[in-house]
Image: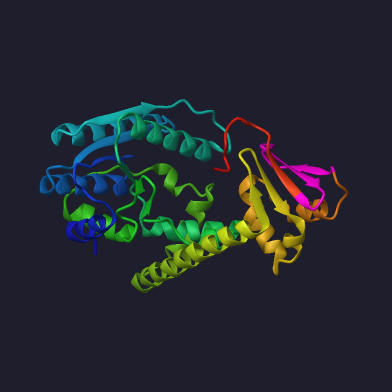
Amino acid sequence: MLTLKKVLTKLKKQINFKNKKIYIAVSGGVDSIVLLNIFIKIKLKIRRLRIEVLHCNFNLRVIDSKKEEELIKKICKRNQIVYHIKKFLLPYNKSIQIIARKLRFFWFKKMLQTNCFHYIALGHNLNDSIETFFINIKRGTSLKGLKGIFYKKKYLIRPLIDFSRSDILKYAKTNNISWLEDTSNTSQKYLRNQIRKDLSKILDQNFYEGFKKTFIFFQEANWLLKNHLKIIEQYICKTTKQNRFFFIKKILNLKFMKFYLHQLFSKYGFLNIQDIIKIIISKNGKQIFSKDLNYVLLKKPKQLLLIQERNESNNLFR
């Protein structure tokens, strides 16, 4: 059950509210409107907390987009909250959701840095985390893709991530909160909506509790793996200001070598493990490029040299 007390109790464990400034990302849907309602109540309890609202208008649903904007303005004016609305023009193509997400978070980060705010609160819930889990499985994923959505990651916080969509709907109805439904959420052309429809047939309280425990296990396992990989990277790698050298003999000595190659090189855009293996056993001077062409992997005597192709003046290995 979603209550103000439960949200505030965990939030206090995650962040120190003293003199903090938090943006609330509000779309107009039930999740973000409930999140805003909760923060308005938190603000009454914690006077030193400052909150403002961020809203992205991509104008993809002309009439609905205008209604969402008007609803957010109405709530903010009623509660004397400063709001910021950013309008975007998007090209209409298959990757429109990906583009919109990148633009949204780019603006969020810019606002955060420009105005010296500490956090951005997002309205993701437990259902979002479960849906992401199955999306990643369908596409094929590593342990990283099974850990669910984190409550807090750098400057992003998700105070509703432990609560189901039904919990949020109950809270909204109990507190007479108005929101707007995004009609695109019912479109079956999106994978997330297809999975959401299938999950609606089986999700109940036992499933929710089971998933919450599972996500904790996967998050802990992922944390252990990341720390283990740092040790392995230190063992097989030498870093200079501009380049990174991987010692071939040490790589070949690794048990589960393919797994380590994927974990260590995929973050640079080298996604085909067979290509990396081929260059390891090839003649000196052979090279392969990362998927985005930002990096090149060059075979040298006894070593693989990782070279940054773009923005070479930047030290990404620091």
Q: Along the line of sight, which residue is nearer the eye, 58 or 263?
A: 263
The answer to which quarter of the image holds residue 203 is bottom left
Q: Is residue 302 magenta?
A: yes
Specify whether 213 is left or right of 117. Answer: right
Residue at (42% x, 31% y) in the render: 58
Q: Is residue 203 above or below residue 65?
A: below
* Residue 228 appears anywhere in the view: yes
Residue extending farthest right: 283
Q: Position of residue 177 (x, y in %)?
A: 20, 47
Q: Is residue 276 above or below residue 95?
A: below
Q: Is residue 271 above or below residue 1?
A: above
Q: Position of residue 139 (x, y in %)?
A: 60, 56
Specify whether 248 is left or right of 294. Answer: right
**From the image, which quarter does the N terminus lie in?**
bottom left
Q: How is the image coloured?
A: rainbow
Q: How many marks?
A: 0
Residue at (31% x, 40% y) in the render: 26
Q: Position of residue 145 (x, y in %)?
A: 53, 58
Q: Along the line of sight, which residue is nearer the eye, 195 or 156?
A: 156
Q: Is residue 270 magenta?
A: no
Q: Position of residue 289 (x, y in %)?
A: 74, 41
Magenta residues span: 285-303
**From the image, which quarter does the C terminus lie in?**
top right
Q: Along the line of sight, which residue is nearer the eye, 168 or 161?
A: 161
Specify whether 268 is left or right of 206. Answer: right
Residue at (49% x, 67% y) in the render: 221
Residue at (29% x, 55% y) in the render: 14
Specify whether 136 is left or right of 29. Answer: right
